[in-house]
Image (cartoon, rainbow, N blue to C red):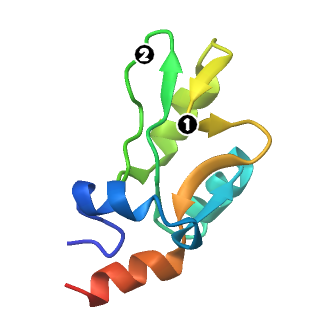
Amino acid sequence: MEAAVVVRRTAFFLAYDDSQCEYLTAQETTEAIAGGREVVSATFVTPYPPGFPVLVPGQVINREVLAYMQALDTREIHGYRPDTGYRVFTEAALAEQMTDR
């Protein structure tokens, strides 16, 4: 199992702890992935329309997801804040989850 894979149920509840999360802009997320970091969503990200989640808590964000999000022609994206970006788990939070197993 990869280090950044967090069990969905655990990720859902862990996301309520602000100290375990941070925000990364789309550019920062792209750079983190390019640098080898596994960036894991701490929230649902749901573009509307169509209203289906693109990301769920515990899901690893990859280049394909970022490309899809960038290509969307919608202004309403629940769970994504243009001023701060994606809410993701900190690297320390992910490391802690792996040591708890």
Residue at horizontal 58%, vertical 73%? 19
Pick whichever, 87 or 32, lies toward us. Answer: 87
Q: Residue at x 41, y 39 (%)?
A: 55
Label 1 – label 2 distance at C-alpha: 12 Å
- Pointer 1 local density, CA inside 10 Å: few below 14, some 14–19, many at least 20: some
- Residue position for label 2: 51
Looking at the image, is mark 1 or mark 2 earlier in the sequence?
A: 2
Where in the figure is residue 22, as x and y percent of width and height? 63, 63
Label ID, residue 5:
none
Residue drawn 19% across and 84% down? 101
Based on the displayed image, in which of its 4 quarters is residue 81 positioned? top right
Q: Is residue 91 above or below residue 61?
A: below
- Under circle 2, the secondary element is loop
Q: Is residue 7 above or below residue 52?
A: below
Placement of the N terminus among the 4 image quadrants: bottom left
Depicted 98 relative to depicted 4: above or below:
below
Q: Which residue, given by chain and number where applicable, does mark 1 sit on?
A: 79
Number of marks in picture: 2
Instruction: Mark 2: give few (<14), some (14-19) or many (20+) Cα within 10 Å.
Output: few
**Residue type at tag 1:** Gly
Q: Are marks 1 and 2 in contact (CB under 8 Å)?
A: no
